[in-house]
DNA sequence: CCACAGCTGGATGTCAGACATTTAGCATAG
DNA sequence: CTATGCTAAATGTCTGACATCCAGCTGTGG
């Protein structure tokens, strides 16, 4: 009955696979169904009781498998009469959120350096600014404008944070490339989380907003070269602040030990 | 006992949150512990029975929460006497694998176009080639060389696929930026999956290998400009093949309806 | 003294069945 | 026609039991 059984002491050199846990096998099978397109986004999977009998495992096992798939953004489960597990199309936000937490863990364990973040951000956001200048829609522009505060003097740290995030999101969204959006959001997000706890001067904050204005203007004007250059300059300007914030975070980590 | 109770028919306009499912709350709490660094990679969580009593839910609920965290690469669970749920550091491969499947779904649903893939790939792999030229180690070079076949004539489609994947992996690994690696792998991987089912001519395949040789030479020579240029040319060359493969995949999808 | 078989304790993996809760739709009373 | 309440179908949760795996201890034969 069990594949890893006995073998009579022969110790044959056959490679035998470890037993895959039942809920993993179930998850694999369902994932395959979804990936092969045999059940499409919006479709409902059979209910838990049915799956249970069809696959010959208990409902508890089925449920553990469903939790795995849900955590991977492949299904969404709802209660009620019309409820069930529905195949879902992952959204850029889902994927970004997942990436953010995973990357945050990596950085927290110091297996990724600040330079790597800054480097990748440059490779993503500078082209994004260029593309935004070329391809933005009216709605994009509006969104970008809305993410620049009128006046920096009456802003708290938290407000600054929100505007900042909004601005960079708006740019990468305006570039019209969903994949670039997915990649850029987490990088920015993790960097910003560190900066958030750092103390920033008034002058610094108002310079940030000034930079944003210039970038927005270049994009609105449809001038890709200017947008690219301004974004590049802006990231250069931010660099020392990130270095400081990163160092502070390191010290906090040290102190916590 | 239940927070969403009664309210005596007053129907006040208070905003009340939907009940969070128990296993979600448990997962959230544990995720927080991990993210705040209160339990560090390698640490073991309390066993299921303990968590069950401490959090006041059944073991089944605890287990569903653990499955969620495991699917998000935050813990690994093992059986046996020394078993339990251990906090894990996600690896670049884990993250890439997750991204690959999610992005594959997006592309399958046609919510991401081929152009977006090619665009992002350009932004990631061209700089990667440049960085590889600047920062490669000896081991990196060896890896890159090993990923170029001696002779293209006796290679099956499957072999070609393996070499191709190996080559591009080796480059982005040699660039020394883990984040770039994480972002680039899935993009390449999804593109390649489509190309795999397409029919490719002998001339095409040998040109690919020739390109790879030139890129490898530039990297080995430590010439970033040349590496960048060669990689750019290479991607240009690949473009039409991808377009064809993508179209074929579309047709297959149409036929399947 | 050592090697090895076997036991054992502690942990996860799986099962079976029951009950609670949520939700949509239907039926019915006013 | 509307509001109310019932019901069916699904997931959510609990309980308790047993199966399985694995490190380490233990005792025994050589």
Image (cartoon, coloured by chain):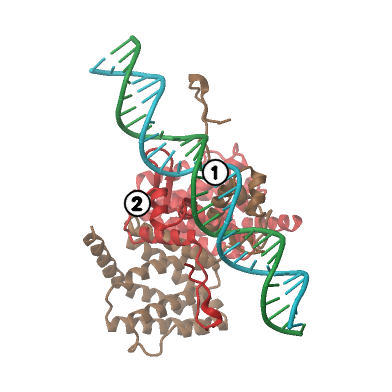
Chain colours: A brown, B red, C cyan, D green
Q: In this rendering, would B251 be left or right of B179?
A: right
Q: Nearer the viewer, residue B45 or B243?
A: B45
Res A180 visible: no
Label 2 element class: loop
Marking on residue B41? 2
Determine which residue is flagged by label 1: B162
Residue at left 37%, top 63%?
Answer: A117
User: Image point 50% across, 52% down: which residue?
Assistant: B97
Give the image location of residue A181, x and y in percent. 50, 68
> Is B179 placed above or below A193 here?
above
> B57 and B85: which one is in front?
B57
Which of the image's four quarters has the C terminus of chain A? Answer: bottom left
Q: Residues within 10 Å of mark 2 (few under 14, many from 20)?
A: some
Q: Nearer the viewer, mark 2 or mark 1?
A: 2
The quarter in which the N terminus of chain A is drawn is top right
User: In front here: A135 or B234?
Assistant: A135
Q: CA distance from mark 2 to mark 1?
A: 33 Å
Compared across the picture, whether A10 is left or right of A210 comes to: right
Chain letter of the residue carrying label 2: B
Q: Is residue A189 visible?
A: yes
Foreground pick, D4 / B76: D4
């Amino acid at each position: 009955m069990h594949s890893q059984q006995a073998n009579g002491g022969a110790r044959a050199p056959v490679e035998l696979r470890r037993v895959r846990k039942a809920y993993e096998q179930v998850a694999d099978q369902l994932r395959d169904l979804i990936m092969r397109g045999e059940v499409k986004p919006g479709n409902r999977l059979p209910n838990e009781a049915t799956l249970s009998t069809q696959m010959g495992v208990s409902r508890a096992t089925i449920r553990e498998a469903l939790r795995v798939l849900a955590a991977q953004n492949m299904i969404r489960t709802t209660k009620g009469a019309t409820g069930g597990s529905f195949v879902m199309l992952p959204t850029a936000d889902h994927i970004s959120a997942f990436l953010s937490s995973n990357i945050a863990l990596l950085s927290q364990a110091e297996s990724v350096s600040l330079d790597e973040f800054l480097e990748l951000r440059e490779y993503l956001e500078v082209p994004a600014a260029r593309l935004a200048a070329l391809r933005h829609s009216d709605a994009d522009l509006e969104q970008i404008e809305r993410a620049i505060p009128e006046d920096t003097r009456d802003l708290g740290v938290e407000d600054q944070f929100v505007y900042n995030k909004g601005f960079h999101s708006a740019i990468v969204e305006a570039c019209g490339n969903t994949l670039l959006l997915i990649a850029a959001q987490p990088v920015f997000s993790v960097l910003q989380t560190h900066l958030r706890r750092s103390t920033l001067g008034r002058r610094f904050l108002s310079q940030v907003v000034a930079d944003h204005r210039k970038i927005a203007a270049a994009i609105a004007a449809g001038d890709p070269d200017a947008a690219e250059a301004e974004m590049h300059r802006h990231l250069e300007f931010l660099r020392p602040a990130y270095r400081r914030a990163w160092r502070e975070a390191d010290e906090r980590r040290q102190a916590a030990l």
